[in-house]
Image (cartoon, helix red, strand yellow):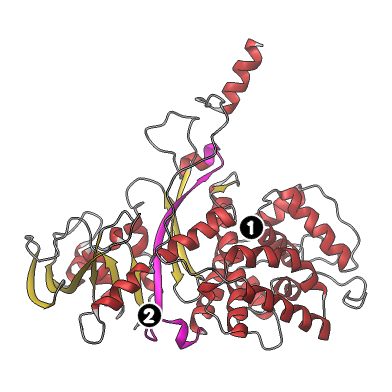
Amino acid sequence: MPFYPPPATSPTFGHLLRSFALGGPDDDLLTAQDLQQACRRHRVDFADQPGALWTPALTLWAFLCQCASAAKTCSTAVARALAWRLGLGQPPCSVNTGAYCKARAKLPEPFLRELCTTLGGRLEDQSPEDWRWRGRRVQVIDGTVCSAADTDENQAAYPQRENLPGGVGFPLLRIVALFSLATGACLDAVFGPYAGRGAGETSLARLLLARLAAGDLLLGDRVFATYWLIAGVLQRQADAVFRLHAHRKRDGSSRSSRLERSLGRDDNLVTWARPRRPDWMDEPSYDAMPERLRVRILWRRLQVPGFRTREVEIVTTLLDAEAYPAAEVVALYRRRWAAALDLRALKQGMKMEHLWCKTPAMLRKEVWGHLLAYNLVRAAQARAARACGALPRRLSFAQARELLEQMGVLLAFAGGAFRAGVVRALEQALGSCRLADRPDRVEPRVVKRRPKPYPRMQEPRAVFKARVAKAG
């Protein structure tokens, strides 16, 4: 067939990018040269001898396909690699998963993180003005928790809930991530245990403030509306839009704040006084914080049937009421839900809710593998959105992931004019996967399907199996 390559073509990073509809002659989002330079920086040089099977290119491709697919087993990843090698004219490989798992463990975590953040940053930088809010880059911050394989190593690094006896719960990994409001790409993420000192969402969020550039706007829920986070955002010459924390008063009547003046109905300019130094902050950092913060607090009553929130209170550093009308700021805050949808796409669409690796180091690599695969899908969506004149947020991520999974091998093998036609067909298909306009859609958090009537396991699996075998 005309799209098959010459025999005995070794897997390359170019094949990897082409399988995700990237790697074209004018494509600068992520190139084979970027991957090769990242390999040199992080010393990813395993299997460099002639005829080696699990090269970095093949290992990374199999890992990303494993993360992007709903089928998470290593045997499925090896089966894909077998099909890929045969399509490239290579001899067949063993379907034993041991060699693949060892090669995957050699991919450094900083290597995967660099590829993910590079691709996400370039997607954000190249987004057109009409994709942004009033021409400004908006980054949405949100957090979630994933469970992990119940091993002693994972329990030591990411313990389960304290109120559960040993062997009943699972290790819990907390993730706080930054997403682009324009493209949906993940810009960066940090991980930590579910509980403990410095493990809260606000503590992890402070580590992400370095990703903000001058003129950016950070959007988040009320948990992030602290004095220290807002001050940190202002130090980066950026702005913030958060939901007001439940302990703050919108009229400035608390001890730590005062009302400066009213900017209109349901809109106040308030000054916050610097709180006392918390235990986690040292004296030089505390002295560097401003003694006063001028913030704007506005609120609106929402008359939406079925919604839990009847009134929303927002704190922002956008102090100019004429340049930033209250109605537009409220509408922007309501788009904060996009980050929850992005996390849902990762945890449910890409099955990242439970992580399967057995060690903490591999757990973090597994998360970065999912985030990189997620950004590759978002990159394909962004290209399709440009081609069809739509917004990336209006295209279905689930359908885009499925299309790329089914067409990945064809995209990797096709060449010349034939591949150009395949890419155009893919872009048209992605552009047709439009999301319905369903404002204020109500999604009750209930479950209709009943669970199976089995008793719950209340002890470690090995102990339970030994006891059952002894009793039998």
Q: Secondary structure at mark 2?
A: loop
- Quadrant of the frame with the N terminus: bottom right
Residue 32, visible in the rendered structure: yes
Q: Which mark, residue 67?
A: 1
Crowding at label 2, few (<14), some or many (≥20) Cα neighbours within 10 Å? few
Q: Secondary structure at mark 1?
A: helix
- Residue under numbered circle 2: 213
465 and 457: which is toward the camera = 457
Residue 419 belongs to magenta span = no
Name the spot of residue 29 as percent of width and height, x first: 60, 80
Q: Write the start and end of the magenta stretch as one range.
A: 127-153
Relative to 89, residue 417 above or below: below
**Residue at coordinates 93% horizontally, 72% vertically from top-left?**
7
Relative to 420, residue 51 above or below: above
Name the spot of residue 385 as percent of width and height, x first: 58, 80
Crowding at label 1, few (<14), some or many (≥20) Cα neighbours within 10 Å? many
Name the spot of residue 454 as percent of width and height, x first: 57, 25
**Residue at coordinates 67% horizontally, 80% vertically from top-left?**
33
Relative to 442, residue 161 above or below: above
